[in-house]
């Protein structure tokens, strides 16, 4: 297994699973969202402060998910975030969900920066870009 980038551990609860005890496929989007939020926080970027200070927020513009193996009730997942491409107003992220060295899901997520007041695209603030 490759070195994990910016890992976040997430436990699988009942609410995350279907009737068979397997993680419901859409819940990987929630896991990836939590990992991105904590990834930003570790870099000193609180999203509420970014909105208040810079009038900008990050929004998901595109997602591609590939499911490789199931996660189940009580599993401890490690979810990662890695920038693969950074532009002036958006970035492409590679996210992965792992369990005990087994890759379960891979997500390619494009995040765009928009003005919170108008929801129109804007440049990622220079200070934010440097922290990323």
Image (cartoon, helix red, strand yellow):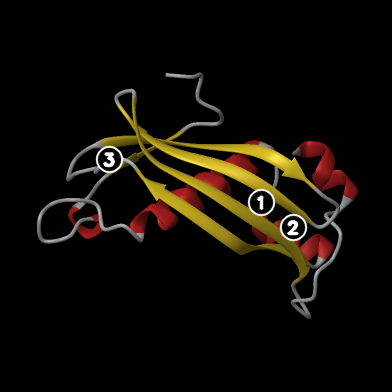
At 43% from the left and 56% from the top, the residue drawn is 29
Closest to the camera, between mark 3 and mark 1, is 3
Residues at badges 3 and 2 in contact (C-beta under 8 Å)? Answer: no
Q: Nearer the viewer, residue 24 or 74?
A: 24
Mark 1 residue crowding within 10 angstroms, few (<14) / some (14–19) / many (20+): some
Residue 66: % across, % down: 41, 48
Please, is residue 75 above or below residue 2 in the view? Answer: below
Residue extending farthest to the left is 20
Mark 2 residue crowding within 10 angstroms, few (<14) / some (14–19) / many (20+): some
- Quadrant of the rendering where the C terminus is positioned: top right
Counting labels gives 3
Q: Which residue is mark 3?
A: 69
- Quadrant of the rendering where the N terminus is positioned: top left
Give SS at disc 2: helix
Residue extending farthest to the right is 126
Residue 92: % across, % down: 67, 48
Residue 50: % across, % down: 74, 58
Q: Using residue 37 as the reference point, say whether residue 118 is left or right of it.
A: right
Q: Which residue is mark 1?
A: 46
Disc 3 versus disc 1: distance between alpha carbons? 32 Å
């Amino acid at each position: 297994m490759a070195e994990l980038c910016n890992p976040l551990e997430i436990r699988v609860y009942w609410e995350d699973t279907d009737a068979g005890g397997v993680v419901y496929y859409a819940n990987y989007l929630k896991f990836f969202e939590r990992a991105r939020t904590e990834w930003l926080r570790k870099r000193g970027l609180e999203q509420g402060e970014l909105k208040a200070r810079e009038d900008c927020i990050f929004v998901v513009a595109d997602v591609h998910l590939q499911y490789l193996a199931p996660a189940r009730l009580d599993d401890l997942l490690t979810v990662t975030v890695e920038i693969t491409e950074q532009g002036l107003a958006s970035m492409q992220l590679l996210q992965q969900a792992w369990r005990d060295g087994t890759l379960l899901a891979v997500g390619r997520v494009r995040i765009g920066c928009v003005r919170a007041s108008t929801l129109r695209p804007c440049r990622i603030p220079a200070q934010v870009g440097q922290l990323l």
